[in-house]
Amino acid sequence: MKIKILCTLGPASLKGEVIERLDELGVDLFRINLSHTPLEAVEDTIDYARRHSSVPVCLDTEGAQVRCGQVEPDVVLEAGADVTLTAETVFSDGSALTLWPRSVFAGLRVGSVVGIDFDGVQLRISEATDGHATATVLKGGRVRSNKGSTVEPPVELPALTEKDVAAVQIGAARGLTDYALSFASCSEDIAQLRALAPAGAHVIAKIESRPGIRKMDAIIPAADAVLIDRGDLSKDVPVEHIPYCQKAIVRRANRWHRPVYVATNLLESMVTNKTPTVAEASDIANSLLDGVHGLVLAAETAIGIDPAATVELLRRAIEAFEGANGSHVLDQGHPQLHLVA
């Protein structure tokens, strides 16, 4: 079985020479993340990747998620402060903050708690109307642009945004056959994407929420492959439970004979450093030992300092796994130790 490498394209990798190098290194799929790619840039991004590589391109939808809008650098919300939430586009200084999609406001209630970004910022809604809400900061912290947010109690959101629908239509017109559905929560979500995508398209279901975990026995067989996005899942599930969720999803995907990929924090330190941590190397090895079929680089190749070096390291980690998997004795006479499988 060939372990696949999936790479997210972004500012760091959307350069001809970088894409060509990633192709040489054996990347299997390029991912365009619609959560960070304007609709008007989708067609050009597809065409640019294709001019420099024959690697297939996958459109990864925004899906049923809530995100904040653009904020000024280093915005910190202080506990006790009041914040205006709006469906309008604003460049936030911390006093007002965009939330999208607009439909999220229909589900906000007095007492709803909104979590922003990964730093644990929490807001409690004190007033809510269509497209507007007032909130008090329960737990302060740093907020960054375009980051995923959570709402408790959860609000109902469409499986595909208007932008997703338009992007899939662009992808279909450009002949793309690979699509990923973010925040898949039921098998019907998969069917909705299949109905929009070209006939025979390869659909990856991303499990990254509590509804996805609860419905995974229906989602996995409905998809062609499964992707575990541990980052967004950690906004919905306590971080200490994420490794066990991963193992449960991998077991079920293998039972249904569906390829399963793992994303988020694989080589996060290499976003800013030239070498990974030992913990990251262990995480990759343990994911492969669990039975995953592919590894997904996100920030590492989208905004990292050296996307090609990150892929080279991941390739070496896969080769180490393949070598260890075929070895049954510890070869102490060789400078490259082969671990007992």
Image: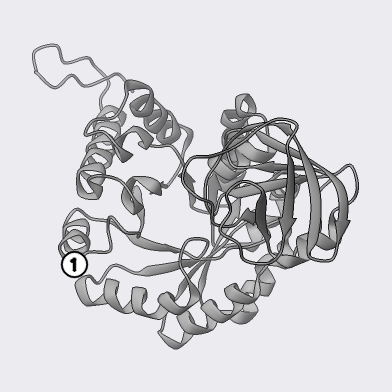
Residue 242, quarter of picture: top right
Residue 160 vertical placement versus 240 (above, below): below
Residue 83 in picture, x, y percent from top left:
73, 46
Vertical placement of residue 167 versus 16, above or below: below
For the question of whether residue 158 can be seen, the reply is: no
Q: Give the side of residue 12 with respect to residue 74, left or right.
A: left
Q: Seen in the image, is 69 located left or right of residue 302?
A: right
Amino acid type, residue under disc 1 in the picture? Gly
Which element type, helix, strand or loop, lies under badge 1?
A: helix
Kindly identify the residue that appears in the image at 30 percent across and 46 percent down.
304
Q: Compared with residue 110, is residue 51 higher up or lower down, i.e. above or below?
A: below
> In the image, is 219 to the left or to the right of 301?
right
- Specify the quadrant of the image occupied by residue 22: bottom left
Q: Which residue reaches farthest right?
A: 110
- Measured as percent of width and height from the top left, residue 319 is found at 24, 37
Residue occupying the point 52% across, 51% down: 145
Q: Quadrant of residue 162?
A: bottom right
**Label 1: few (<14), some (14–19) or many (≥20) C-alpha neighbours in 10 Å:** some
Question: How far across and down, in percent of the image, does residue 180 sit?
Answer: 53, 63
Q: Is residue 306 above or below residue 122?
A: below
Describe the colour scheme in one phrase: one colour
Q: In the rendered image, is residue 196 in sight?
A: yes
Q: Nearer the viewer, residue 194 or 275?
A: 275
Q: Which residue is mark 1?
A: 16
Name of the residue lying farthest toward the top = 332
Quadrant where the C terminus sits is top left
Left or right placement of residue 61 versus residue 185 in this view: left
Image x and y of residue 239, in percent:
61, 28
Query: Could you say which is closer to the camera, residue 176 or residue 248?
Result: 176
